[in-house]
Every structure is written in structure tokens, then in C-alpha cells.
Amino acid sequence: MRKIAILPDAVANRIAAGEVVERPASVVKELLENALDAGAKAVAIAIEAGGKTLIRVADDGEGMAREDALLALDRHATSKIRTADDLVGVGTFGFRGEALPSIASVSRFELETAAAGDAVGTRLTAAGGLVSAVEDLARQPGTTITVRSLFYNTPARRKFLRSARSETRACVEAVTALALALPGLGVTLLADGRQVLEALPAESLAARVAQLMGSAFAATLLPVAHETAGVEGRGAARIAGLAQRPAQASPTGRTAHLWVNGRPVRDHFLVRAAERGYRATLPAGSRPCVFLAIEVPAGDVDVNVHPTKLEVRFRDRYALEAAVEEAVHRALGELASAAPIGAAGGLSGAGAPARLPWEHAAVSRAEATSPGLFGAAGAEDSAAFGSDQEGAEEPDAGAALVEGARAVRLLGQVHATWILIETPDALLIVDQHSAHERVLYERAMQVLGGADAEGGEGGGGGAASQKLLFPQTINFAPAELDAIEAQGPLLARLGYELEPFGGSAVVLHAVPAPHPRFDAERCLKDMVADLAGGRFGALANPLERFAATFACRGAIKAGQALTEPEMRELVDRLFRSELPAHDVHGRPTIVQLPRGELERRFGRR
């Protein structure tokens, strides 16, 4: 007796449905993608009981003739491809020809459609995958698909569905992902007669985000735009979108949307690459929201690796991850990212922020020089964290901070904590501790760059240190002694010369001198306590953790009065740093009060 048999179509369709139709949101996604492939400009979606009892998707696309409508319910019937070669670079959302027959096989299904120029349309009714009626229909071009009683004939699948509220939330997420991918699309979603999503055609991704998630949230996002050059037969990759400001990132509620060549995908590694782009700017435990559209040549990505097309495979994944990381990193490094007061600490208004005066300077950040508290500026400075340039000519108090900048004046210090700067368009308020923390962190990373990731020593030399006339003996707790032993090479590169003295004691022979106000002993004690307690554990890279700890503990503090040359040099160095807008905890270093806001508050507008 034969043991192998060909499965009936009804059984094969239900097996396929198990891969394609996971839950009501899967149906909504597949039907919405079909509408988009049909050229729809507006789509109306309605669900009941989270989609378990009703899903209806109506579009204004090109519609189908009757013959095509009947064929659409056959497995592997598709208008998207003809040969296997068409799978390379397929530009449509759907192409497998499994969605409609799979959905129809586990529901009570109705399709109404008409193509432009047809005298009559078609209404097609099916249940459990079997067509029961085909009728004429008067309607405008487009398609409406109604799915009732999902999984009615597979109760084992139906009982695993979640509550109506959870299924509704999943449907909203599926529609949101596609609405963000196509800002020009008009889409509405009704749940049990209540409108839960309305997205009118928008001009940009930023406008769409504001539409769907609120203008306050959209104001916390920065534009991302980056392109890589094609090498070794691989084409260029383009990354565009939005990334959240570090200060607004939170441990919960992270949103990560990725699109590859217009197709929404899930890719944990690309999300992690985007997070690496923040590089010691995030508060501990926080996860930023990102919206990234990635474009790669068709031959560099395989979209035919997942039944629901939510995963793709890249020809050179590591290069793409590096490109995503660099794209986010560059977005955070833009000088225009100083946050204006208001709008949840983000950009005011829907447009891009005004450029800061330093961007108009005749002398670039890398070339500008202004000696002071934090040492000589510029690429030729060989000191680890700057040097005290005694005898250097000090600029006049009212001089511009960067030579060639338009009328930028240092106004002074408020409460020995914030530095005020006047520009033609705004009042800038700089947090002196956060600013110095950013400067010291980037200097520390330069010095520690010669050490390997495990904390070993490498080339490049460490920071200059200062020998103590009388060595100091300091006692530490056992966990702190372990941290000193583990981080000894890095402490040495910073300029600390330590020697075990037996028991809990350590002798301090030499210390770094990054600036004249530096308290070397206090900094060492605080650093070791932080390292032993894992305070900066949110940073994956051990060098970043170490540098962030040093920067936090070594920076000047709130409440310390600064001279005008010191303030000028600090701000000057901040704006020459790679990521000037945030400190190592993700807090803003600068807020900006636009001149127009001042005028409005005083009734001049």
C-alpha cells in the first residue's frame, strides 16, 4: 500500500494559510499590500472584534476583470512575476500568489472588483476556499475584499488568537508600518465602527509621523540622510529617515520601523546598528525610536526568504549595518541639532531648525583655534585633553567665539551652571557640565583608541600625566579593587599610575591633568565606584563605558564659576566635537531660545 499521497488542494491551502495567515493583522497586511500593488491612492479598512469576525479592505486601484478575479484564488497565481529571474529585484509587495487563496481557505470570503472600462464588475463569494457564487456587480474601478469568520473551519487556530483589543492593536501596527512607508497614501482604519487611524496624503515621512504619532513626538526626531559608495561589484546604499534625539529616548515604548526598497521588514541587527550610531549619548537603559528607509540595488537583497515577506537577506550585511550606524551617527552630529526651548525639547515647528552661527563661520570647526582652559584647539594639538596655555593672548570679552562667525557674543554665566551666548537669531544656553563631559569623552576615546576592546594596551601612547611630589595612599572596597585590576591598563593610558600597597590600599604616584580644575583623587574614587557598580553598563563597548565614566567624573561641575576665556574655550571645543548636542547620558548640552520666541513672549509679535 502506498504511503505517499498528493494532498488535496483544500488541505494544501490550509497548510499555506498557516504560514501566511498568522492572525487578523496578517490578513490586513496582505490585502493592503495587494491594494498598493494595484496602484491604490486611497484605502479604507474596517475590522470587527479585532478582525476575527470581519475584515474589509476597499481600494481605488486598477481592479480586475472577471477572468483574473477567478484566477486570483488559485495557489501561486500572480500578476507580479513570470519567470524565476523576475524574483531578482521584484519591486512589488506581493509576488508569491499565496495570500488570497490562503485567506479564502480559512474564512468566508467575498471579492468585489471592477477594472476601468468594464461594463460590469464581479462579485465572487467563497467559503473554505471553494467558490460558491460569481455575480455581476455595478461599481467603480477598484477592489473590495471582505473576510468574515476568520479560521471558522480551523478552530484549533482560532482559539490561539488573542483578545479583540490585542488583535486590533496588531492591525493598527500593520497599517501604520505601510502608511509610514508610503506617506502619499491616504488610508483609514475603523475598528468596531470607531475610527482608530486616519492618514491623509502627506508630503514627507516627518509629516506622516506627526500625523500618526503626534507633532510633539515628531519634534523629538532628527533627519537622517547618508549614502555609501559602491565597491567590489556592490552598488551604493542609501539610508534616509528619522532618528530620535537621545534625550527623548526612553526604556519603554521604543518604535523601530525599517523599510528595504520600500518594503517593511523586521531586522534586529539593523536596529542594533542604528542604536550603535548613538555612541555614548543615550541615558542608561534607553532605546531610541528610528524610522529608516534603506535603498540597495535589487541584486544585493533577496526578498524571497520568508512567507510573509517580513525578512530579507542581504548580500553584504556587515557593510549595510556599518552604513546604518554611520547614518545615525552623522545625524546626531549635525550642529543644527541644538534643541530649541519648547516642543518637548525637540525642533520647533515642522520644518528643519535654523542653522547655528558656527555653520556659517569662515573657519571650519577643525581649523578654528581659540586657546584657553581646555588647551590649544585644532588638529595639531598633541595633548590628551588639552593643555593650559599660559601667556596666550586672550580675546576681548565681546569677541566672536569662532573667527569669521556672524556676531556671536558670549554674555556670561548664570547660577555658575549655564553659559549664555547671543546669536543674531537666538539665545543659546549651554550646560557647562554636560558640555565639558562631551568634550572630555571624545578626547578620552581618542586616547583610549590605542587599547584593545578587552582593556589591553595598544599603540598610540596614552595621556600625559603629572607625577605627585608626595604619593597618596587610597583605600578601596574589594569590588573596587577588582575594578582597578581589570581596568588597570586603561587607567594607565589616561595618566593614572597606581601601585598595590597590600590589603585594601593602593598608592597613587601620578595623575592626569586634563584641565586646571581637575580633582584627580576624587575623580579616581568616583570612577572606580562607578565601574565597580556597573553604572555605565548600558554602553556595550568597554572603551565607551570607561571613557564615559571618566568624562562624567572629570568634567567641571555645576556651581563652578568660570572666567570668560574659560567659557569661550569650553563652548568653542564643544562645537568642534563630533556630537555636540548631547552628553554621555543623552541629556542636551544646549537649548536654544529663538529670537522670535523672545519677541512673542514680550508681546512684540
Image: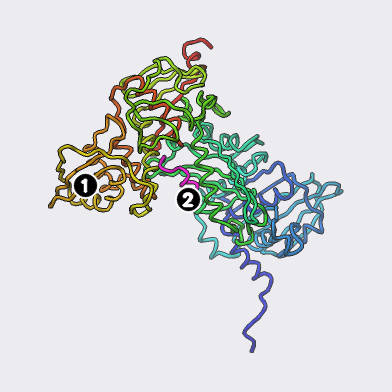
Please name the amino acid that badge 2 sits on. Answer: Arg
Please name the amino acid that badge 1 sits on. Answer: Leu
Magenta residues, start to end: 271-281
Q: Name the residue under label 2.
A: 272
Q: Which residue does the image show at 77% across and 51% down from the upper left?
A: 113
Magenta residue check for 445:
no
Residue 129 showing in the rendered view: yes
| 531 with respect to 46 (left or right) | left
Q: Mark 1 points at which residue?
A: 498
The picture places residue 273, in percent across and down from the top left corner, at: 49, 49
Q: Which residue does the image show at 41% across and 26% down from the upper left?
A: 571
Task: Describe the element under mark 2 as helix, strand or loop.
Answer: helix
Residue 196 showing in the rendered view: no
Q: Above or below — where is 539 with respect to 70?
A: above
- Outermost residue toward the bottom in this view: 1
Mark 2, Cα crowd under 10 Å, few <14 / some 14-19 / many 20+, is some
**Residue 45: which disc?**
none
Sequence-wise, the earlier of marks 1 and 2 is 2
